[in-house]
Structures are given as structure tokens and as C-alpha cells.
Image: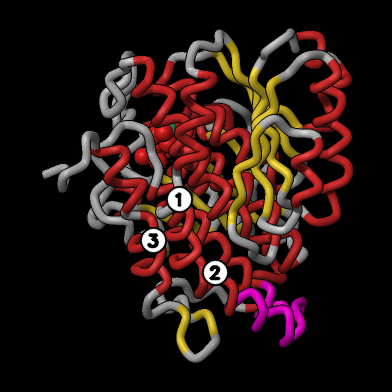
Amino acid sequence: EKGGYQHFMIKEIHEEPKALRDTMASRIVDGKVNLSDLNVTREQLEKAGKIIIIACGTAYHAGVVGKYVIEKLARIPVDVEIASEFRYKDPLINEDNIVIIISQSGETADTLAAMRMCKKVGAKVIAITNVVGSTVSREADHVVYTWAGPEIAVASTKAYTTQLLCMYMMALDFADKMGRISADEYQRIIEEIRKLPELAQEILDDKEIIQRCADETFNASSIFYMGRGLDYAVAMEGSLKLKEISYIHSEAYAAGELKHGTIALIEEGTPVVALATQKGLFEKTLSNIKEVKARGAFVIAVAMEGDTEIEKEADRVIYIPRVYDILAPVLVVIPLQLYAYYVAVAKGCDVDKPRNLAKSVTVE
Ligand code: F6R
């Protein structure tokens, strides 16, 4: 059942190229996004005022990327909310707002409760879910399925990458309907999206350096993640993967925030995973790497092929294939998932069933 793999998690990581391919198949046709499952009109988008993304855990982290790309491409304001926070406040929401619920299982109690609140005020609810027939899929107005296939390991991997892909397709669809994206930019993103499965496979074919980084750091008591912009969004997900399966204390920081407090935690040998894939932010992140290095950090950087300048500053560099940087999260997360996996295996942890966690959180 594990197809020759030692754990479901590593099997599911290896299924990411296929999951991405299946999720875009029939939705990217003749160079255009065709989300027939989602008929949001230009009028609805114009009237919406804002989009609200609601989710928990890893799905929430996909939402953070979603906010960034919808705002960037479609120029529509997006709030991204943790379901358990949203449901217990007096949220600013009205019937014109568009709500996007993200849930792999489609059964998470807090997410369901938040969705029902949104439906009650009459907002339009779109769900991104992986489970056909799940409660979320039955109750939402529209469903965009991630075709990741069953995800069995508690730590979510292929669901996240396909949730990201759905966010990109939706952002393109909204941007196009709003007339806010040039034909060239639209085409460029479509072409790069189509390459993602192949590029993800390249990462999976060359894991040696990631294994080495894990072997060098699995004894650490704390591991920090940092990045700017989309790299920060992925840093949060990388950090969550590590804590849930390896039980190592970890935090993710917006790299520019370090000097406002966190840098005090860096000691001789503290591992810092630094993500530097965003074009306009590369130099900035590089100076943050210098700052933590100066305090003794052991820096594992993730950068794009060709950005070799980073080798001067970081102790180890994991390269991802070059891609339009707005799409980098889909690739960057894969080495982070593998790193968390190798660290957990090196520590002898029960990777597929980490302590205290359940696959589907149906309690509140
Ligand atoms: C992390 C993880 C959890 C889930 C969260 C939401 O690896 O699996 O953080 O992402 O419990 O679950 P769903 O997406 O099923 O609503």
C-alpha cells in the first residue's frame, strides 16, 4: 500500500508531480484557465469588495499564498483568516463578499463552523477541498477540487501543493475577468504553471543535499525559518511540517522582522533555513543571512538555480529549478517537506502518525 516507500508521507511527496498534473488537467486548456466548477462573474468580483479566505493549519498557509497572488494579479483585497479565530469574533462580512474555504478533508470542525457563518450572511462560498462528497463540498456554493488523491500521512504535503495550484488558477481567472492582467503576463504564468510538474520531479530526482542538511541538523533543539513575501508564506509551512513530525521547536519569521527581537535567539550553530527565491527581495534576504551568520547561525538556504551569489553567505544551498518567482512556493515547499521528513526519520519519529495529532480535526 505504500508502494515500496517506507512511509506514506514520502510516498505522497513523490506523488506531487502527478497531483499537480491531475489538478491542472482539463482546467488549463488552450492556454486559458477554465474553472468550469467556478462561475464567478465580473460583476460579482466587482461588487465583492473583498475576498475572505478561511482555513486551518497547512490549508491556512496555502491561503496566505492565495492572498498574496490574488492581490497581486487581480488587485482585489483579500483577508486570510484562521477558522478558529474567525468564528469566534464578530467578523466584518457581508452578502457581497466572496469566501474561499480551504480544507483537504472537508471535515475540519472550525472550518465548517466558519463556512456556515459565511453562508448565513449570504456570502458566496467557494470551497477548495480534496475529498469528494465531504461536508465542505456538499455545503459550499461552488467546489474546486484538488485532485491530489487520498492523503493518508497526517502531515499534509500533496494537498498543500495542489491547494496552491488552485489558488493560482483562481487568481488568474479573477485577474482576467477584472481586466487587470496583460495578455503577455497571463500567458507567461500559464506556461510556467504547465512546467511545474516536471520541475517538481527534478527536485525529487536530486535529494542528496537535502538529506545531508537533515543529517547535519537533526539534533538541533530549535530551527528557524525565514523569508520575505511569498518565501515567508512558505517558511510558515516548512516550519509547521518540521514541528509536527520531528518535534523540534521551530518558528518562521518574515526576514525583516528578525532584528525586532528574534535575532536574540540565534546562538552558535542554530540552524536557520533561509528562503531566497523572490527576485526583488533577494538582496534583502541575503543581508538577513549575513546578520544571522554573524551570530553563529548554520544557514541552509533555498534559492533558484543560477543565484550562486548565495553560496558566499550560506553554509548549504538547496537549489530549485528556475521558475517565475510568483510560482516559486509550489517548488520551494518540496525541499522543505523532504527536509522535515529526513530530520524526523533521523530522529526515529513515527512520521505518518505524529504524537497528539489527528488527520482530520473534527473536534473544536
Ligand atoms: C498539517 C496538517 C494540518 C491540517 C489542518 C486542516 O500538516 O495536516 O495542519 O492542514 O488540520 O485540515 P483540513 O485541510 O483537512 O481542513
- Magenta range is 175-190
Disc 1 marks which amino acid? Asp
Residue marked by disc 3 = 17
The local crowd at label 3, few if under 14, some if 14 to 19, many if 20 or more residues have their Cα within 10 Å, is: many
Q: Is residue 156 visible?
A: yes
Q: Quadrant of residue 325?
A: bottom right
Residue marked by disc 1 = 206
Query: Which residue: 70% across, 53% down?
Result: 68
Give the image location of residue 305, x and y in percent: 66, 57
Disc 2 marks which amino acid? Met
Residue 321 in the magenta stretch? The answer is no
Q: Left of 20 or right of it: where is 9?
A: left
Q: Left of 16 or right of it: where is 68?
A: right
Is 315 above or below relative to 106? above
Residue 188 in the magenta stretch? The answer is yes
Is 343 above or below relative to 134? above
Give the image location of residue 233, x and y in percent: 65, 41
User: Helix, strand or loop at disc 1?
Assistant: loop
Residue marked by disc 2 = 169
The local crowd at label 1, few if under 14, some if 14 to 19, many if 20 or more residues have their Cα within 10 Å, is: few
Whole-angstrom CA distance, mark 1 to mark 3, is 14 Å
Between tags 1 and 3, which lies in front?
1
Q: Quadrant of residue 32?
A: bottom right
